[in-house]
Structure formats: structure tokens, C-alpha cells
Image (cartoon, rainbow, N blue to C red):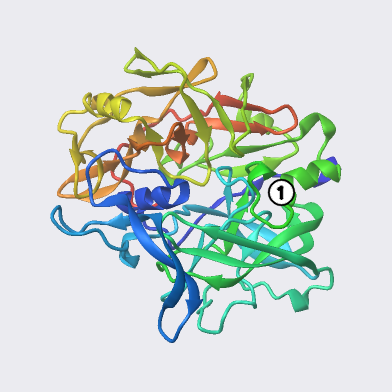
Amino acid sequence: MTENLTRITRVPNPKYQRSGPKSYVYLLNKYKFSPTKPGPYLLGGKVQQKGKHGMARLFGGRAHVQRVLQKRSDPDAQPGDVPAEDQQNDVEYICPVTIGTPGQTFDLNFDTGSADLWVGHFTSKSHHIAGVLTSRQIWSTELPKSIDASGHTVFDPKKSSTFKKTTGATWKITYGDGSGASGDVGTDVVNIGGLVVEGQSIELAKKLSAQFASGADDGLLGLGFGSINTVTPKPVATPVENMIAQKDIPKSSELFTAYLGSYKDKNDPDHGISFYTFGYIDETALAGQTPYYTPIDNSQGFWQFKSTTASINGKRVERSGNTAIADTGTTLALMDDKLCQAIYDTIPGAKYDEQQQGYLFPSNTGVDELPVVAFDVGGKEFAVQKEDLAFADAGNNMTYGGIQSRGDLPFDILGDTWLKAIYAIFDQGNKRFGAVVRSDPTQDPSVPTGQ
């Protein structure tokens, strides 16, 4: 067993272009929260008709109002649909995964913020796959011919001798803007870094909403908990749950880990490497440290833990009852409005920009002018690297910050902005989250140009 345990390298998505507003819109869609700061994006009501299809519209039945993500082009305008150019698949890194016999290799986004396995968005010239997988959702030959899959690996079940269709099983997901995807389910052999998972459920898209063009990824592999799996009539097990059930990983190490590097770290001791492990903790990544663990609450399907304090330049901020989730499928970190304001109040020239619906600060801000911001993980705080407070170019010599408002979400989202500062241990067997500080002695606060 142990001879198959190895690092799974995360590689930069060559098509990813950083954009603060697009990453924020992605999160609005993913978590369906309502913004509490002013800006063009909002959750609004959209009337939908339930009834029979006529020549050009539905008739009969009843109308109902659905809450969907919308955009207001100017303060006096009525909100409308969010245009395609405002969106992108927020996938900065991808990992190779092989499916079927013989194996077909796909570049997937590993996402701890998806309870099943969800392949976020697959795009083409004018179409976009969006979906949550229970185990994995990938480009498949069941897609309509109108979908341009060029640039993506397309899964062909007929070419795999081990694929089996799951009779009667379907999946369907809907995003905050009303878009979505749906299709059939099957099982096959999945190879993740040498770990072979038998009978893993795979979601095959048959219907997709037109969305936005972006991304080199072929799908997303969810690393959350299967309790919010979307397959009906019966939820299916996630890859990690199957690794545990099939004893693919040791009983003593029913876990996976994430070490998220950056091109900015190429001169640091680890040279900015980025990887996942399954079934073991990488001793080199620990660098002699003992992991700090805290219990998690997985009742909502997330890696969620208590986070009742924060600190800004050493000044403690009490946040009674607050919780946070660790989400490798999110680039930003989202906090409550009061904490966001307090953070940016310490940066000279920082401001909230309504047009971009986010906090910005001057691009020439030096390392010494940036605050030390730390978030609590069940009793111990871990700080964001200063270089990751700068997320993307915002124009006019301003930078879009890596920490933004969580709106009316009841918990924080600790995405890559924070995760890059630690070596994260997702201990599924013991239902706990662990961390050690990642060594990064040099800080580059320049505006990121890529990964």
C-alpha cells in the first residue's frame, strides 16, 4: 500500500488570468451569498414560469420567484443577468487524474469547498460547464455537439472497459446566477497519484448552461464530505471516502494534505512547489514542526472549524461564535465587513471601490506598510503571507486585495490567500484540521501577474 503513496503535483493553469471582480463573482455563484457591500452584483428576484412548453415559452402552471445573482449596470438601472465577460472559472492550479481502462488523463481542480466532488466550470468558445460532482464531473462524449470541447480531454465511456453506467442515477446542480448542469452517472477506476480507487462514481454532463469562456481544467475533484453529494436518488461516496473504505490508504492516516506554493516563492527554500498527498503527511513539508490540530464540524459538508479571533499587527479582534472553512477551490479569503474594514484601514491609501465591489490598495505599497493579518484555527492563529494580500491588478495603479467581504455568509472562507501560508492537513479519519507554518522568508508584494 505505502509504496503507492506519493506527492501529486499541482501545476499552474496556463489559461488562468487573475481578476478580482471575476473571482468574487465566482464565489457569489458558488456559495450563493448576498453581498452586503455596495456594487454592481446582487441577489435579486427572477420570475420563472412553471408549466408546459409552448412554441416559444412556458404556459399554464404557476409563476414563482427565484433568487439569482444579477448585475446592475449603473445605480439607477434595473438589474439583469450577469454577462459572460464578468465571469471565469476560478481555477488557478490543476492536478492530473486518470480515469478508466485504459486510462484517460484529465487536469482537475482539487476543491475542499465542494462537498461531493464538483467540477466547477468547463468552458468552450461560447459555452461553459458548471457542476457539482459527487465524485467527479468531467467533459464527456454525452455533451451536445453544439458544445466546443477543443482544448479539453473528453471522457469517452465506450473506450473504457471498466466503465459501468449507474442505472437510474442522475445529478443536477444550479448556481447562484440560475445556470447549471445535469446528466448521468457511472462508475470507473480512478487513479490519483498512483492510488487506484475502484468503482468511483463519475458524473457525465448531458446538459449545460452557456456561461463564460476560460480555463484549461477538465473538471474538479471534490474533497469535501459526501453528505452534500448531489446524485439522486442516492448520494455516492467521494474518492477519499472510497480510499478509506477500500483501504487504499493506511488506517492510521486516513487523510490528505495540501501544500500550496506560488511563483513568487521560487527563491525560497521550497522553490514554490505545490502538491497534495493522500494517506500520509510529508515530513519535508513539516520542516520539523508538530502540526496543530482542531476538531472540525462537517455537518454542512465543509472542513469547518472555530475561528473566534483574528489579529491585525498584533491587535486582537474578538469574534465570538465565528467559524471558518478551509477551501482549496477558492483563491480569495472572505471575512465579515467589520474585520475587512479594519484590515484595510491599516494600509495607506486603501479604499473600497464600488465599481469593482472590493477593497483596493496602492500597487506601490511596500512590505513594511502591509499589516500582519492572522486568523484563528481553533485556538491558534496563523498569519497570511504579506505577499498574498495583493491578489490582482485593479487598474489605476491599484491592487485588488486578497481578503474581501463574505456578505451575509455566516462563516469565513479561507481560500488560497490564507492557505499558501500553511501546510494543511485534512484528517478525515479523525475529523480534524491541522496546520503548520510554511517557511517563506522572502516576501514579494508586487501585483501578481499569474499564479
> Residue sitting at 45 percent across and 63 percent down?
179
Above or below residue 83? Residue 175 is: above
Residue sitting nearer the eye, 63 or 330:
63
- Label 1 sits on a secondary structure element that is loop
> Residue sitting at 46 percent across and 83 percent down?
54
Above or below residue 120? Residue 112 is: above
Where does residue 367 sit, x and y in percent of width and height? 28, 29
Say which quadrant the N terminus sits in.
Answer: top right
Where does residue 94 sit, x and y in percent of width and height? 55, 55
Q: Name the residue under label 1.
A: 238
Above or below residue 410? Residue 210 is: below
Residue 250 in view: yes
Where does residue 363 sit, x and y in percent of width and height? 21, 41
For the view shown, which residue lies furthest in the bottom direction?
Answer: 55
> Residue sitting at 74 percent across and 58 percent down?
201
Residue sitting nearer the eye, 21 or 34:
34
> Residue sitting at 69 percent across and 28 percent down?
431
Classify residue 309 by image quadrant. top left
Residue sitting nearer the eye, 115 or 437:
115
Q: How many labels does the image show?
A: 1
Q: In this view, does 431 lie to the left or right of 250?
A: left
Above or below residue 338? Residue 128 is: below
Q: What type is the residue that disc 1 sits on?
A: Thr
Residue 5 in view: no
Where does residue 192 sit, x and y in percent of width and height? 72, 53
